[in-house]
Structures are given as C-alpha cells and as structure tokens.
Amino acid sequence: MNVLSVERLSKRYGPRQLFKDISFGLEKGQKTAIVARNGSGKSTLLKCIAGVETPDEGTIAFNKGLRVGYLDQHVAMTTARSLVDEMLDRDDPVSNAIRTYEHLAAKHTDGDELHQAITRMTELGAWDHEARIKRLLFQFGLRDLEQPVNTLSGGQQKRLAMAKVLIDMPDVLILDEPTNHLDLLMIEQLEAELSAPNLTLLLVTHDRWFLDNVCDEIIEMEFGDFTRFKGNYSWYVEKKAELEEVRNATQQHLRGLMRSELEWVRKMPRARGTKSKSRLQAFDVLKEQATRKYDHGQVAIDIQTSRLGGKVIEARNLTKSFGEKKIVEHFSYSIKAGDRIGIVGPNGVGKSTFIDLLTKRTAPDAGKVTIGDTVVLGYFGQQGLHLEEDKRIIEVVRDIADVIPMSKGRTLTASQLLERFLFDKEKQFQYVSTLSGGEKRRLHLCTVLMKNPNVLVLDEPTNDLDIPTLNALEDFLTDLGICLLIVSHDRFFMDKICTKLLVFEGEGKIKEWVLSYTELREHQKEQEKAAKGLREVREEKEVKQEKKATPSNKLTYAERIELKKIDKELPTLEQKKADLLAEMAEKASDHHAVMELSISLEQLITKLGRLEERWLELSEKGE
C-alpha cells in the first residue's frame, strides 16, 4: 500500500535551485534514506514533505488517517517548562493526569493530593502510557523529568525531540540525522525501534552502519537526478560503482559521436533544409549529453605537519569527579607518536571531559598531564565554529591566515584552500548564515587543519558531514602519520581509523582495547548473552525440578508447569502493584522514594503485560 506520494517537487532559494521535478512514493513498511552532498537540499526536502516548509511547485500526499512524525536536524528548545511538560504537550485527560501525578511526585506535597492523582491515573488506565514515556526518556538518557528544557545540552534536546516523536507511535517517520548525539547503545536501540515492519521511514543520515542495518532503499540526489537503489547502503555502493562505469563508457561513446557530427556541422552547406535543421537540433542535444559533467570534485585534504617528538601526552594518576560522579580515577597512560586512539563509552560518562583533561583545557582533581614540547594541537569539537552569521566564508579563513603552508614546501592562499574543501570562488563570498549544517562542519574542519597540527583531537567528527567528505577525511587520516584522539559513536569511522580504544566502563574506570570497535561491541554482547544464559539455565532447572506426570491436554509438560506458575504469579504481581500504589500515596512527601517506587511500578507493569500475553497464549492452546 502506497502511504506517501511526492509529485514533481521543486524548491529554490533565490538564484539557487536546490531540487527540481522530484517524484517518488513510499510503500507501507518501506525504510528509505536520502543521500547527497552537504548543501544539496536534503534537509529542505524533508521539511517540505513534513509540511514545515512549502515547496515552490509540486504536490505531497499522505494516506488519510496516518500519524506522521518529524525530527529536525537542528533542535533548539528555549522553553523553561519541565521535561515531562514538553513530552506531554497536549490537552487530553491522560496527558493531564500524568503531568499532575509527575509534578506532585516530584514535589513535597500532602499525601491526599498525590493519592487522588494516583487514583485518577488508575481510573484512566494511564500507567501504561506513563511507563512508555519513561522508558523512552530513560532509553535516551533523560531521567530528571522536572529539569527545565532550556537547561538541557544540545545533544540532550535532540534526544528529547526523538523521544517526543516516538511517543505517539507514528505510522510514518521523517528523520533528519537521527543518530547525532546518540551513543552506540542508544543507536542500537533506535535501530530496533525503527525496524518495526509496519513503520514507514524516510531519513537522512551519515551513519553508514545505520543505513546498512535499517534501510532497504537508498535514494541519491546528484547532478539534478533522483536515483533509487533498492537495497541497503552496501548494495548502493556496489550498484553506484557499476552505474558510474556504465555512465563513463556511455559518455566516451557520445563524445565520439559528437566529434563525427561536429565535422558534418563544419562542412555543412549554407542552405539549410528541413533535414539539416533537424540534424542540427539533434547535434545540440548530443553535445549537451556528451559534455555533461558528472564530477562534483572531491575534498582534497592536505597539510604540513611539524615534527613530533617521542613524548606526546602523558597522564599520571589522573583523577576527576563532579560531585559523586567519577569521570576518571587514578588513570595513567602514555600516548605515543602515531597512535590513533578512539575513546568510547555511553553518553554522559565523561569522554569529552577526559579529552579536555588530556589537552589541559580542564584541570584534574589529582594527578598530572604532561604535553610534549613539539606537540601542536588541533581540536575539532562537536559544537563547531562560533561565528557571526553575517561573516563571509573567505573572511573566516583569512582571519587565521592569508597564506597556508602545505606539505613539500608548497603554499596555498586562503581562497585556494577553500576550493580544496569544495567552496568555489563564488561561494566563498557568501555569508556563513547561508551554509547548511554539514557545510559549516566542513568549514570548521578546514580552519582546524590549516593550523597544521601534529596531534589532532576529533570530538564527534562525523556529525552532519556528508558521506563523500567522510570518505575523504578517513582516507586522509589513515595516510597521515599524526597522532589522533577521536570521540565518536560512528562504528564505520572508528573501525577504519583507530588502532586502539580507551573504553569507559563507568565509575572512573577506563580500559584499553586493541581490537576494532565492532569487535568490542560483539564482545560486550557476548558477555551480556552469557549473563542472560546463566539466568535462563537457573530458571530451566527450577522448571525441571517441578516436573510431574505428563499432562492430559495439548500443552507440553513444561508449558503446563509454566501456566501453573503464571497462574500463581499474576495475583501476586497484581497485589504488588496495588501495594506500590498505596506506598506511593503514603510517601507522597518523599520525592526520592516516590521516584524509586515509580520506576519499580513501570517495571512491574511491563512484566505484568508480558505474563498476561503468555497466559492467554497457553490458555488458548490448552482448551
């Protein structure tokens, strides 16, 4: 069933044509990604489809009754209202009841008022919805429901926006760079969420691993064309290479025909008949096809690096905490020339703070960091450049240097360097405000590398960069003999660049891992699987111990035992649920106790739902 139809869509900003005559449709359950270079209009296309912007021409039609969710690439929430108010931004009985309950639970209030709120939640059957809200928020690392939204970091706001989009379980999701600011565990959870068979997905992302795992179609916007590739990212790369080979061969053939026709045009008599005019028109079409350029140019990254001595960065007994939260504790490590180190761990564990400690941007509580005398640091941060929007691109580079030394004694002017980063002479005089998010990141990278560092710190370098720029950056970093410190959750990027990892395990513990990021994640999953296996073995032994005579109905013996166990467990869990609700009412004035009880209630509701489904399944089988 077709759920979305886009017909002859066009959009222009001033003299610049972003896209023209785009037509495509999406079937129910289809997972489609749009790939293109930064500045090609990907985000604008998504905004037009989501109804945030209006196209110049064309029509967009969704099937009636579909719920559509949209996540913007850039999220800026300035409201001072609480996180739970932002999540439940609507006026209906269930949302109002949940908001009232959460606010009362977070405040020191009398028991009667909270008891009434709990009773109202129970009457409306709002606990399941409240549990889903908390599950989503906790999944995205957001636990303080009363925190004002405008105090959240940019990454936290993006995660809140993602949770808010998912809460209504939309039929069609339109997502712009959804993996930015998510750690690997969150990305894997999002992959599972988006892989639901009936969910239709249209997204833009630079995360090639995510594209492989989630998408079943890639649409490429390039050279004014809109080309569809039925398959994931790996399939797209393979088929695109074949397409380019065929296209190059076709162009060579067309150029040969054009040369033959050109000789006829030059020798043609002055008197032009109808046949001659028709042939001339055909020649004009042939010339246009044969001379059409299929080359955007590649980012050409090249720098001159100064000599790096044997001593780079050395940490001795490094310790840093914020209150009770330990970032690093008694950590000693020596970074050597040529090291390409990835720093990985869940969001909020302190990776960026750790980078600041190693580069002396932040002072430790104890211990010492020593930086070698020959070290020239370059820092490419996830926040990007802080520039005046009315500044021209060429001015940004000239403020640093007019002439930039390159390798082998060569030099480049500021304008020539910008051309290597795909900012042509015309674009160089545009204002920073006209750049897309990815183009601003590319400009930031240019300003960092033009300082010729020999130790390069990259904090989430892949955010917003297009895939061709990422490929160029990876090739450059792989061939460059400088020291690298990289914080990233991009599995593809880390596997290709890093030779070792520093893994944050929490509570200030950091361990070294000498294999790839993918192998680390597989190792972690095996450990989780082994722990789960031990639990299942214990449960299986308990079932075997309860075995009795073979049942007379259709159920197997194990299933009969399981059904009896659930029969006994369900009333117990229902009583626990009632006890929890009563205890929450009694301890209404104790905020921390209510929050703990609320989390326990959420887990209990989830378990009850799972057991009730299993009870129905077994009961029907035994009838």
Image (tube, helix red, strand yellow):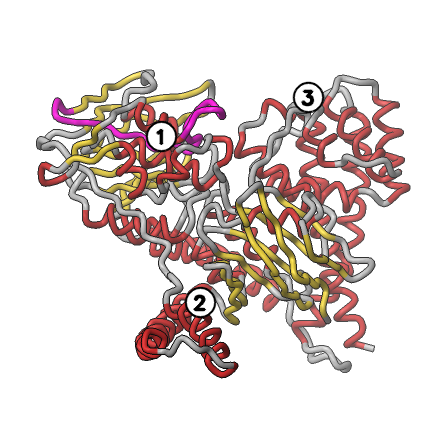
Quick one: label 3 or label 1, which is nearer the N terminus? 3
Q: Badge 3 is on which residue?
A: 80
User: Helix, strand, or loop for circle 3?
Assistant: loop
Q: Badge 1 is on which residue?
A: 394
In the displayed structure, does residue 491 sit left or right of residue 202? left
Please state the extent of the stretch shown in magenta in the rendering.
Answer: 372-392
Q: CA distance from mark 2 to mark 3?
A: 44 Å
Q: Please give the name of the residue rendered at 77% of the width and 49% of the height, measured from the top-left corner.
A: 572
Please state the horizontal and vertical placement of residue 202, each as a whole percent of the image.
61, 57
Q: Please give the name of the residue rendered at 78% of the width and 57% of the height, measured from the top-left corner.
A: 66
Viewport quadrant of the C terminus: bottom right
Q: CA distance from mark 3 to mark 1?
A: 38 Å
Q: How many marks?
A: 3
Q: Please give the name of the residue rendered at 43% of the width and 40% of the height, measured from the top-left corner.
A: 439
Mark 1 crowd level (few <14, some 14–19, many ≥20, 10 Å Cα):
many
Q: Do residues under tags 3 and 1 come within 8 Å of each other at their CB atoms?
A: no
Q: Tag 1: residue type?
A: Ile
Is residue 254 at least partly visible in the picture? no
Q: Tag 3: residue type?
A: Ala
In the displayed structure, does residue 96 sit left or right of residue 504? right
Q: Badge 2 is on which residue?
A: 236
Q: Considering only vertical position in the picture, is 535 above or below 53? A: below
Front label number (1 vs 2): 1
Front label number (3 vs 1): 1
Please state the horizontal and vertical placement of residue 498, each as a whole percent of the image.
27, 47
